Amino acid sequence: MAYYSRTLKLPFAEVVRRVTHNLKEQGFGIVTTIDMQDTFKQKLNVGFRNYKILGACNPQFAYKAISVESHAGVMLPCNIVVQEHENGEVEVSAINPLENIERVFTAPQLRDLARDAGNRLREAVDNLHREIPEKHNEALPT
């Protein structure tokens, strides 16, 4: 699977809050937020459902990856999509960095970093249904 996904029956803003919190607990910070609803309204003058792309970055992982392979930055940050469907459910999808890294780079150190990052992203998504998410034992500072 190229991404991890979970669907919730919660308000859109609450899901964005939870995923941001969960990512922080896993050592990621949000470095970019793209509000597609707002962008489509401003640029195309069309209405669109709630849809945000969150660019998550774990600075330690990013530093190590770019130190191993200078072009690894093309894979950064890790994207998480939060979208509201017509039925009111909100879906969160996070990229699986391991599958994407393996397609582009061969350095074993990058695979190890991508595997660890992927495990943390998956845990952040999997814990969205919990009121207080479990903290990863080795969460890195943001």
Image (cartoon, rainbow, N blue to C red):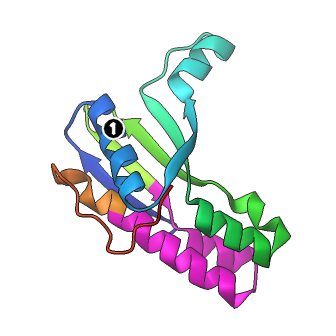
Q: Which region of the structure is painted magenta?
A: 94-123
Question: x and y percent of residue 38 in the render?
Answer: 54, 19
Question: x and y percent of residue 110 in the render?
Answer: 67, 80
In this image, 7 relative to 110: left or right? left
**Residue drawn at x 76%, y 67% as measured from the top left:** 72
> Based on the displayed image, in which of its 4 quarters is residue 60 positioned?
bottom right
- Dot 1: element: helix
Question: x and y percent of residue 44 in the render?
Answer: 66, 15
Please say whether residue 83 is one of the residues in the magenta stretch: no
In this image, 134 relative to 114: left or right? left
Please say whether residue 103 is one of the residues in the magenta stretch: yes
What secondary structure characterizes most of the magenta part? helix
Up/down of 47 relative to 130, above or below: above
* Residue 85 in view here: yes
Question: x and y percent of residue 42 in the render?
Answer: 63, 12
* Residue 86 in view here: no
The residue wearing badge 1 is: 17
**Residue drawn at x 39%, y 66% as measured from the top left:** 122
Local packing at callout 1 (Cα closer than 10 Å; few below 14, some 14-19, many 20+) is few
- The residue nearer to you, when weighing 83 against 117, is 117
Up/down of 37 relative to 102, above or below: above
The type of residue carrying mark 1 is Arg
- The residue nearer to you, when weighing 31 against 104, is 31
Up/down of 19 relative to 103, above or below: above
**Residue drawn at x 50%, y 15% as measured from the top left:** 47
In this image, 53 relative to 111: left or right? left
**Residue drawn at x 49%, y 77% as measured from the top left:** 116
Question: Seen from this angle, which residue lies furthest front?
Answer: 141
In this image, 132 relative to 1: left or right? left
